[in-house]
Image (cartoon, rainbow, N blue to C red):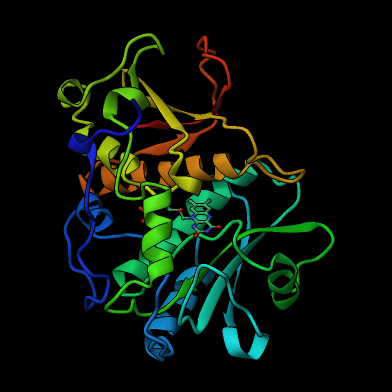
Amino acid sequence: MPYDVNTAFRPRSNTNRKVNTMSSFLELAKTRRSVRTFDGNWPDGAVLTTLQEFAENMTNPFGTKIRFAFLNAENEDLSSPVLTGEKEYVTAVVQKGASNLEAAYGYSFEKLLMKAHELGLGTVWIGGTMPRGKFEKACHVEENEVMPCVSPLGKASERMSMKEALMRKGVKADSRLKFEDLFFDENFDTPLPESVAGNKGRLTDALEAVRIAPSAVNKQPWRVVVIDNAAHFYVKHDAGYITPDYDLQKIDVGIALYHFESQLISEGKQPSITVEDPGLPTPKHIDYVATVRF
Ligand SMILES: Cc1cc2nc3c(=O)[nH]c(=O)nc-3n(C[C@H](O)[C@H](O)[C@H](O)COP(=O)(O)O)c2cc1C
């Protein structure tokens, strides 16, 4: 049984806050949700400038360059069938075949979208429900580049559109898998319940920050095996997410890496992210992605 009312979380605090002043990443992440209904106004110019500067100075642990483009929806004639009232988009582009493409992409774009959230803007990862060709043209995607996802940027409307409410219901967006379905102690045979994660380098909050992260169709494909002071991140593949140039579910794992690292940093730790497969036996359809040492 994948969903459990006890594990449901409700990050329903409205995203129309002023600039966020929360002390831990987890607190901030708990107030995030995908926003698909906007108030129809342009995002504040100063906020957008702050975000653009943040994007220009962005780094990621994989050293893979991600190019962000901010696009005026009206000028570029951009829209998405799942969105209402959006005026601005941000897209992210990466070189085809770049090293750790998906992990770097998920990490970097989530870093930008969490910054947008911190600044009071609503966002939603869009990897499928968009006229892809129009967006690629608007951000000048070259032959050797790929643009897996985009996001709108704006103030959330006070009320969700009916289609947004239905969409959230359809993917059970307010639920997540349980700790012990996602996280493991030393090997994939030993689930790591929340009560035990507290003893393992006090990882409860960092793993919770992973658990509540966004993922394509809310599949939550991240799996984590904790061994000593290392958390090894894996992807559990579902059918239909691999394109010739990237695996959308590995992008989800990049998002998870960013959430885990950010929570550890807000706890005063100094985590590092590397790619060093520990060679553990893995269940079917599960592949190694990266490791966080803390
Ligand atoms: C890589 C990725 C791709 C996504 N693509 C879409 C999309 O094409 N359309 C959409 O409406 N939502 C998309 N989402 C949003 C997810 O549906 C959403 O994150 C998930 O249902 C959990 O809801 P929450 O973000 O409100 O917690 C995507 C999310 C991720 C991480």
The residue drawn where x is 30% and y is 43% is 175
For the N terminus, which image quadrant? top left
The residue drawn where x is 63% and y is 41% is 241
Query: Compared to 45, does 68 lie above or below?
Result: above
Query: Going by the image, does 207 lie left or right of 249?
Result: left
The residue drawn where x is 70% and y is 65% is 132
Q: Residue 40, located in which quarter of the rendered image?
A: bottom left
**Foreground: 243 or 116?**
243
Residue 8 image position (x, y, % from top left): 23, 42
For the C terminus, which image quadrant? top left
**Foreground: 203 or 7?**
7
Residue 2 image position (x, y, % from top left): 35, 29
The residue drawn where x is 63% and y is 66% is 130
Residue 191 image position (x, y, % from top left): 31, 16
Query: Compared to 189, does 136 lie above or below?
Result: below
Query: Compared to 48, does 228 lie above or below?
Result: above
Query: Compared to 42, does 116 lie above or below?
Result: above
Q: Residue 67, located in which quarter of the rendered image?
A: bottom right
* Total tally of numbered discs in the picture: 0
Residue 25 image position (x, y, % from top left): 25, 53
Give the farthest residue toward the right: 143
